[in-house]
Image: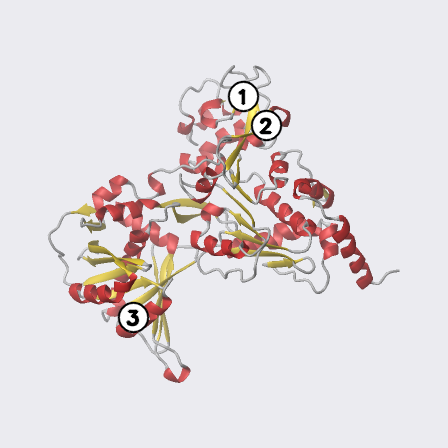
């Protein structure tokens, strides 16, 4: 009998010599080598996946509804690529948070490996098998990472990057991660996501791709159409807008008889594979990226019109239903600042009514400054805003602090951390803001380290910011009339930047609850919005700098809880 070392060596040789297939045959490798619930994996109910998996494009983007099996598919997809690509294949797989990434690797991906004899044979005692890194022999790696601010970056060169739920990931982190594939000869990239608002990350990428859609040819009249929930799904005896269905009236309609009808003949078409065809929506456009638009009607054996109609009532919100159940971008008043919100915030005043002020700064090549004060009712008023080139930053910072008697200041720590550290030595009421990934309603946490020359420790004042909760708070405060902004030469810019940020709802994989995630559009013009956020936090810190809370030697922390 062979010893274990020889056995593993022969298995790895066998995998290396017989496991290689072209990208156009990956679905075959998956059905032959992976299992689900103890049985060979198949595409019987999720047959749309074969077209995606076998596509050989360098870049692929997918817009999808939630819960249609794309994440499960992608894990098998990357495993097949790692196992069959000659020589080197290093894959980076990202989720919106590190917790979600490692949870997925620990559960779903671990089960896939356990059911794949080829993958297990490729691993030996020298391979790494942790929650965030899996190796399958030399130069065959899969890294699982979070794509949120504060998550550790992937330091190695990648051959392929997969972004799961792109629209819920931090765009700056995604940009950094994408640089990791530039040195590879492959430079493969896959991005997929449930969409949020029009113009978000995934819908923008889809717009700039050759867009494939699964058309249906009606088996009754031969009419070809793309199934549309709002147009084609009918409930007998119900002639009102489907969006008006709620938990309160669902029992009054015949929702159990909901059916999708052909828009041409009015009869129920067969939506299964033999009557479907992938069609390129924009064949005359020469895009480098291949896009796939998925719909719940691409899984007719799994998702039925009955379940979708019932889903409207369960979501209780048309926007969320359209995003998560239908895979279509949507927004409403809860998606962010509206034109009406901003007009109600804007005021005309000759000068500031405050004697003391606060300063918030969004730092960049062009930094955005906001100065404001708080009245006796606790309402925040913005009295000045301006944009400043980096070359004049120190000059304008000093001038504004002096002119408006700014008693506390908050500016973001990145991308010029040396700038904020240097200014901290001259301004004892300046705090460096840093976004952190955090669940719950804690708005921020202040940390102060006093100078200790013996330990080579500088005086550092930081404030960890719960990005989503703070933006929720700003919107709520604005709508309750507790934030106003003086109209000056930057007013139109302020309005544009506040409206560029949109709020999405993402299901947390660990709790199943909804958490707000705010994203900027592809234009990325949100600087004044974050200057306002930093100003709001600076105003909340007035007790710290005004003697309301002494800072003791060493490390001092303070938390403020707030809700929307």
What is the CA distance from the residue labelled 3 to the residue labelled 1? 65 Å
Q: Is residue 564 visible?
A: no
Q: Residue at x 52, y 14 (%)?
A: 265
Q: Is residue 300 left or right of residue 248?
A: right
Which dot marks residue 423?
3
Q: Residue at x 26, y 58 (%)?
A: 388
- Residue at mark 1: 224
Q: Would you call the spot at circle 1 few (<14 residues within 10 Å), some (14-19), or many (20 or more)?
A: some
Name which of mark 1 and mark 2 comes first in the sequence: 1
Name which of mark 2 and mark 3 comes first in the sequence: 2
Q: Looking at the rendering, which quadrant does residue 361 occupy? A: bottom left
Q: Would you call the spot at circle 2 few (<14 residues within 10 Å), some (14-19), or many (20 or more)?
A: some
Q: Secondary structure at mark 2?
A: strand
Q: Position of residue 549 (x, y in %)?
A: 28, 70
Q: Residue at x 24, y 65 (%)?
A: 397
What is the CA distance from the residue labelled 1 to the residue labelled 2? 10 Å
Q: Is residue 175 visible?
A: yes
- Residue at mark 2: 277
Which dot marks residue 300?
none
Image height of 469 relative to 400, above or below: above
Q: Residue at x 41, y 55 (%)?
A: 440
Q: Position of residue 237 (x, y in %)?
A: 46, 17
Tell which of 253 and 335 is nearer to you. 335
């Amino acid at each position: 009998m062979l010893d274990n070392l020889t056995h593993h060596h022969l298995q790895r040789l066998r995998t290396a010599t017989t496991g290689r297939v072209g990208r156009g045959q990956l679905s075959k490798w998956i059905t032959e080598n992976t299992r689900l619930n103890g049985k060979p994996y198949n595409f019987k109910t999720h047959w749309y996946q074969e077209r995606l998996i076998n596509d050989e494009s360098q870049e692929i983007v997918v817009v999808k509804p939630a819960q249609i099996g794309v994440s499960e598919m992608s894990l098998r997809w990357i495993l097949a690529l790692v196992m069959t690509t000659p020589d080197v294949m290093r894959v980076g797989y990202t989720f919106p948070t590190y917790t979600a990434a490692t949870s997925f690797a620990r559960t779903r991906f671990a089960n896939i490996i356990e059911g794949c004899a080829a993958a297990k044979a490729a691993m030996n005692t020298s391979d790494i098998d942790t929650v965030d890194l899996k190796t399958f022999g030399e130069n065959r790696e899969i890294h699982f990472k979070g794509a949120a601010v504060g998550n550790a970056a992937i330091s190695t060169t990648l051959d392929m990057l997969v972004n799961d739920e792109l629209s819920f990931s931090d765009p700056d982190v995604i940009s950094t991660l994408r640089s990791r594939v530039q040195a590879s000869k492959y430079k493969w990239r896959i991005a997929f996501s449930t969409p949020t608002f029009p113009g978000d990350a995934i819908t923008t990428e889809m717009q700039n791709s050759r867009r494939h859609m699964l058309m249906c040819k009606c088996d009754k009249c031969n009419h070809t159409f793309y199934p549309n929930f709002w147009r084609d799904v009918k409930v007998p005896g119900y002639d009102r807008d489907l969006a008006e269905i709620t938990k309160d009236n669902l029992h009054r309609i015949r929702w159990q008889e909901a059916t999708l009808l052909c828009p041409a003949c009015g009869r129920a078409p067969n939506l299964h594979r033999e009557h479907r065809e992938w069609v390129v929506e924009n064949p005359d456009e020469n895009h480098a990226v291949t896009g796939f638009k998925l719909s719940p009607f691409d899984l007719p054996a799994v998702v039925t019109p009955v379940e979708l109609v019932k889903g409207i009532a369960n979501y209780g919100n048309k926007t969320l239903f359209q995003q998560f159940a239908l895979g279509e971008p949507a927004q409403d008043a809860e998606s962010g600042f509206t034109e009406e919100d901003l007009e109600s915030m804007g005021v005309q005043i000759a000068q500031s009514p405050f004697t003391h002020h606060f300063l918030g700064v969004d730092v960049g090549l062009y930094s955005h400054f906001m100065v404001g004060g708080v009245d006796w009712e606790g309402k925040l008023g913005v009295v000045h805003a301006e944009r400043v080139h980096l070359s004049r930053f120190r000059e304008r910072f000093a001038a504004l602090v002096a002119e408006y008697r700014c008693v506390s200041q908050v500016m973001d720590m990145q991308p010029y951390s040396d700038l904020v550290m240097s200014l901290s030595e001259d301004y004892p009421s300046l705090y460096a803001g840093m976004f952190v990934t955090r669940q719950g309603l804690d708005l921020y946490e202040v940390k102060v380290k006093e100078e200790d020359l013996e330990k080579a420790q500088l005086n550092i004042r930081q404030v960890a910011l719960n990005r989503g909760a703070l933006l929720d708070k700003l919107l709520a405060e604005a709508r309750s009339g507790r934030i106003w902004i003086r109209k000056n030469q930057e007013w139109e810019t302020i309005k544009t930047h506040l409206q560029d940020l949109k709020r999405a709802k993402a299901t947390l994989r660990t709790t199943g609850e909804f958490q707000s995630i705010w994203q900027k559009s592809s234009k990325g013009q949100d600087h004044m919005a974050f200057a306002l956020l930093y100003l709001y936090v600076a105003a909340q810190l007035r007790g710290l700098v005004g003697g309301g809370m002494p800072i003791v030697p060493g490390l001092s922390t303070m938390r403020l809880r707030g809700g929307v």
